[in-house]
Image (spheres, rainbow, N blue to C red):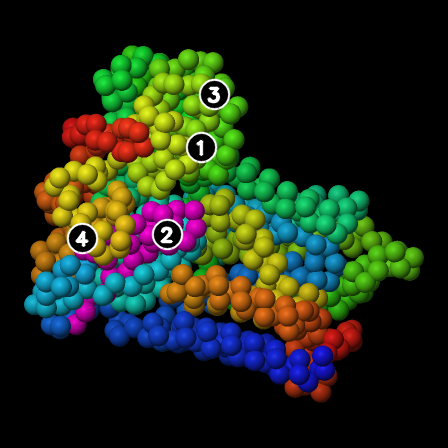
Amino acid sequence: MNPRKNGILSLLLVLLCSVLVLAGCGTPAAPATPATPGGDAGSAGEPINVGLNLELTGSSAEFGLSGQNGMKLAFDKVNAEGGVLDGRLFNYISADNKSEAGEATSATTRLVGEDVIAILGPMTTAAVLGSIQIVTDNNVVLITPSGTNARLTVNEDGTVNPWIFRACFIDPFQGEVAANFAIDALGAETAAIAYDIVGDYSGGLAENFKRTFEAAGKTVVREEQFSAGDVDFRPIIENIKSAEPDVIFVPAYYTDDAHFVLQARDAGFTGPIMGGDGWGSGDMVGIAGADNMNNTYCVDFVYIDDPSLQDFVNEYQTAYGRAPDGFSVLGYETASMLIEAVKNAGSTEPEAVRSALENLGEFASISGVMTFDPETHNPAKNAVILEFVNGVREFKQIVAPK
Amino acid sequence: MRWEKNLILLAAAGVFFVLTSILAGRGLISRFVLLTMTQVCIYIILALGLNLITGFTGQLSIGHAGFMSIGAYGAGFIMKTFDVQAGPTLIFFIPFALIFGVLVAAAFGVLLGLPTLRLRGDYLAIATIGFGEIVRIVLLNTKALGGASGMPLKQFVGWGAAYWLMLLSVVLIYNFVNSSHGRACIAIRENEIAAETMGINTTKYKVMAFAIGAGLAGLAGGIYANHMYMIQPSTFNFLKSFEILVMVVLGGLGSITGCILGAIVMTVMNNALGIFPEIRMIIVSVLLVTMMIFRPNGLMGTTELRLPFRRGPFGTKGDMTNGG
């Protein structure tokens, strides 16, 4: 290839790159009022910007996409009804955090620069941790639909993070619910725990399960660890089997747990296996097989076949052509919390929205009543226990917060 | 002549910095653009280091994120241990933390450099992948460093520090490559046996290249840790190493300006395409494939971008072969 032609081609490539870059940076770069980041007094009719910082790609993409659909449904619904504050409509801006803390920081920074009044998401704990400082510095509220770690809203020294809220119960509650269910409903005397050491989530649930279980005078006979993405669980299953537990608690995400269940059944373990809300999304049954999933239980935020949820399920089905899962419900509830707070506040001023969220009190949402504690920003809400029966999640019982 | 030229370059760098600082201060450059610019600086430092190892010395290394994480956790560890708060003590603690990160990373560079005496090509690449993964898994299981959930940190290093440290790294690498040490490294890349016959201590220079490259990655990691609020092991995975390698290959193995260009293109593209998450990876891959078809040696090949001086600022003495 002659050198001149080469030069022209590379020039073209560089041009192409810069065009792409400009196309990306150019549109959102200029904030309307740089002096008041995060909110404008806003005249009637002006749209209200809301940022959705979600796991659209990467390892937790299933959660992010479900959550995003739920949020969009809530905003589209209120927009169709004429909006809030005398006809102001919600305008949502999505950003992908690739299921990574560093990328969540970038996404939050970008959204904050686009004059959003609130950021909904991320779904996972680590990604929320990467965003806390930026939203606090810029006075933008952040509501995480499913970041269950207790540390997100309350710091280690007991002070509350003023700008961080959540729509879900926290890990300790989930671990407690699972342990109490194992004792009361399954009559377990001994339990084994296998948890994922990647991320706080699984370990947090395991720890609280163990504490509650042992406080009731029962024994945890075996604790095993694995890393998310492992596919061979046979060695730890053998260890667990030899300890002969009444129940196994595996509070990780669905891909790992489905393989775990499949291999545990192959190894001849027929007892009950339990998990957390990480089982609520994805194709557990498809991976593990319907028969193998019999006699397994999970704690979840919602029971999707609950009659009071059917309006939501139908709307969701019509809009997206697929059934919602627990994360869609949480996404919807997160958006509803913000909509309610904006209505209560009567403005989109950052401090007004923040204080309205803090004082939501008892908020009737689609999955039941959520009671917000202004001291911790955590909602008290019902948990449900689901049982897998022939490949279908069936409602087992509701556990009310104490 | 040389002094004048360097002064002009320094002045240009200074003017650019002052300009961006003023614009950022007045809100004309959004926080997101400033963050992107800082990330560009971080990736330039990473690409420079890897370019020295892979581009100039010819040792294929795919464990660069491992060195980066060592630097990040090293610097983060110092900031956490001394519970550094905003205030005048920062003037002491920030350099201390960054230098600590650099030294630890460089020490690991030497450690990893030593086995390269025996390994070549693909085998070395596999060994470096293994190294990167080992570092990640060790961090994942070290509760004192936050384990899997990572280490939350404060933002103490901003755009200014990242920018000047990036320039410092460019000057360091430029001078190294154009010294007799640098020529020895290039000789190893071109033909190791011939280089050895000519009396070059190949072991020494390979280890040297690894140490400097790892040290720079450590510096980039330290800046990252003190800028991004949060470091966690999963950030420094195999894909991150690969991303840095792509920057170097895209820009041109063995070209300083090339790897700078590669780092800028890849980082800006990654952030700019954030609004189209669905098609981002497709665009990036199409671009890379197109690139490799039309410019198999990268954007710059082994040549350097020159400014219109009488004798270019890059490649004056060494003046590498023109790859056109």
**Residue A368, located in which quarter of the rendered image?**
top left
Chain to which the residue tagged by mark 2 belongs: A
Which label sits on residue A267?
A: 3
- Packing grade of label 2 (10 A; few <14, some 14-19, many >=20) is many
Q: Nearer the viewer, mark 1 or mark 2?
A: 1
Which label sits on residue A259?
A: 1
Report which residue position mark 4 lands on: A315
Amino acid type at image mark 3: Ala
Is residue A7 among the parts visible in the rendering? yes
Q: Earlier in the sequence, mark 1 or mark 3?
A: 1
Contact, mark 3 vs mark 4 (Cβ under 8 Å): no
Report which residue position mark 2 lands on: A55
**Residue A247, located in which quarter of the rendered image?**
top left
Q: CA distance from mark 3 to mark 4?
A: 42 Å
Q: Which residues are magenta?
A: A46-74
Amino acid type at image mark 2: Glu
**Quadrant showing the C terminus of chain B:** bottom right
